[in-house]
Amino acid sequence: MNRYRASLIIALLTCVVAFFALDLQRFFTLEALKAQQESVAAFKAANPFLAAALYGLLYVAVTGLSLPGATVMTLAGGAMFGLLWGTVLVSFASSIGATLAFLAARFLFRDAVKSRFGERLKGIDEGMARDGWLYLFTLRLVPVFPFFVINLAMGLTSLRTLTFYWVSQLGMLAGTIVYVNAGTQLAKIESLSGILSPGLLLSFALLGVFPLMARQLADAVKSRKLYRRWKKPARFDRNLVVIGAGAAGLVTAYIAAATKAKVSLIEKHRMGGDCLNTGCVPSKALIRTAHFLKQTRVSQSLGIARVEVEYDFADVMARVHRVIATVEPHDSVERYTALGVDVVIGDARITSPWTVEVNGQVLTTRAIVIASGASPTIPHIPGLETVRYYTSDTIWSLTKRPDRLVVLGGGPVGCELAQTFARLGCQVTQVARTRLMRREDGDAVALVEAALQADGVRVLTHAETLRCEAEGDEQRLIVRHQNGGDEEALSFDALLCAVGRTARTEGFGLEELGIATTAQGTLETNAWLQTLYPNIYAAGDVAGPFQFTHTAAHQAWFAAVNALFGGFKRFKADYSVIPWTTFTDPEVAHVGLSEHEAQAQGIAYEVVRYDLDDLDRAITDEAAHGFVKVLTAPGKDKILGAIIVGEHAGDLLAEFVLAMRHGLGLNQILSTIHTYPTWSEANKYAAGAWKRAHAPERLLRWVGRYHAWMRG
């Protein structure tokens, strides 16, 4: 196959090179056409069928090889054959030639492009499969891009050849008529710009409006079909109803109220959602206590011989709940009511695209935002119901420290809580189906795993959970080691299931409305966060693709603005720069591409790394471990991603997030003054390492000679 490709490429290149080397383009100018108009007309009169055949073959060759001259050939068609037959010949010849160029691009280049940019091409292919014909039709109607570029680009997609052909022929027809008609007036045209007479300009203006009108008509037909089984209220009580008062719901309601919309926020349980009550806030409060205990155990490194600490686990957990209560007013009913939000406590059920039922009352609304969040995933383990197990939602009910804790799951939550409970004095075993923290690079994971083990956590990776057993007070998790295949019984007093979170999609009436879910269990939304119904949106964990509080708040802006003002302007949700942090010790902070992600996507990159054991502030804090790693475009300071492992990594990451979001490079970070001695200097030193690696050696050699000359 490679030999055939090579032969075809050589043949095509030979034809193209010969075309320019022999200066054949001189025959495809308006002047040449007008000069030969009489002789061409005479030949056509004497040999009408042969002239038509030769003309069609020549047109196919020009478009198939993507040579310049199609415009003049179209004019010639009008001059030679008149409006009707000229249009017929040009329409078929141009479509056939375009299809040949399309097939050539697919045969010669698509495999290579797919192997290098497979993930990016996959997204384009999905879009082409959905409405690619309409996109191609728009490109054909409005000549924004040269037609030969469209031919070659479409060949790299999965668009069907037959679809490409008929859409091209139909889409180019109107433009073909305009140019062929101009060719019938060839004697009056002095230059190609003469084609753009006021009448023809009006024709092209109509062509530009047509695809927009066609798209609006298609959307109207689709909308009518979608909504026809529902009765739309004559008027609405509210502009927006938000279901769920977690991060996404709170921000959505806040924006709506701030823009003077009438908004109702429905929450069935506790304001603040998982983050406040069972996630971010309690876990970070517990991590802080565990971190203090760790510091007392390594006090000798600070010159303190010994520190004795006594604590009661119940007091530690009481502090966690006190912290929740302190933060709680930020998300309270009273605060949001004062902001102008109608807060309703109850179970919400969507009964139509415009109505939500809660506490026996039916609310009518122009738009709905579903922000119902997610809940911990309960794994399917035989016998799980017979043992004492907890999730990240229920672990905060503990008042007595479990002596033996098994943590099931190797993700961020599992790692954070395994280390935390180990530092609190528990005997902790962590079980992971694969490796720890699968989304992170191996060098980052290695430091975290070593830290977990140093804190006493027994880490079992690549282990399969088989079943749970309970005999009296003894509880066990049976696992199989994948490497050796042996089974092992892990005894525990408490089992923490931290294997992920599942979007809350049931109980809201979504099934009756036909709103679909994805393979990941989240609600299916488009780029504007719309579900099946354009006036029903989803944001936060229930929508995915990320399950972070900050991304939920980020999505909420798009959902709120699109729901309230989408009739004027819509915004696509932007996931181009999404940061996250795993709050282990050391912390792991990440934004953009990691090395394994770049490799998987076939993206070229360079790596610069600065080790924190060289940072003065890290040394003074007895925390000189970890690194700052930055991925850049080859030869450029453009930041593709950053991974920081160490103390305060989550705080240090913000500088890279800012730089990536606003198109700043490492040179800008390097030229920014950072206070000494601070942790943030690590970012500057990483930028400096990149600068040294890309120093202009040749120029520096000349500068060295200059200095030597100046010394005499």
Image: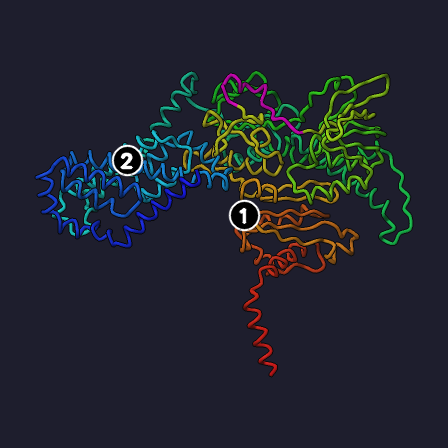
Residue lying farthest to the bottom in this orientation: 712
Task: Please tell me the numbered disc located at residue 95.
Answer: 2
Give x and y (percent) for residue 710: 58, 80
Q: Note whether 672 is above or below 463 in the view shown.
A: below
Give x and y (percent) for residue 240: 50, 29
Q: Give the range drawn in magenta.
A: 500-516
User: Does 254 sit left or right of 683 as displayed?
Assistant: left
User: Does 394 sit left or right of 243 as displayed?
Assistant: right
Residue at 72 percent across and 48 percent down: it is 646
| Front-most of residues 341 and 48 | 48
Q: Note whether 301 is above or below 553 in the view shown.
A: below
Going from N to C along the chain, the mark reached first, 1 or 2, is: 2
Residue at 55 percent across and 67 percent down: it is 698
Callout 2 amino acid: Ser
Callout 1 amino acid: Ala
Task: Say what secondary structure mark 1 lies in.
Answer: loop
Q: Which residue is the site of mark 1?
A: 604
Say whether residue 524 is visible: yes
Task: Say what secondary structure mark 2 lies in.
Answer: helix
Residue 425 sits in which quadrant? top right
Question: Per the image, is 222 magenta?
Answer: no
Kindly report the distance in space between the C-alpha atoms of the residues bearing marks 1 and 2. Answer: 37 Å
Disc 1 to disc 2: CB gap under 8 Å: no
Residue at 82 percent across and 21 percent down: it is 475
Give the class, few, some or many, for how many residues have Cα within 10 Å of label 1's Cα (few <14, many ≥20): some
Question: Per the image, is 506 magenta?
Answer: yes
Give x and y (percent) for residue 617: 74, 56
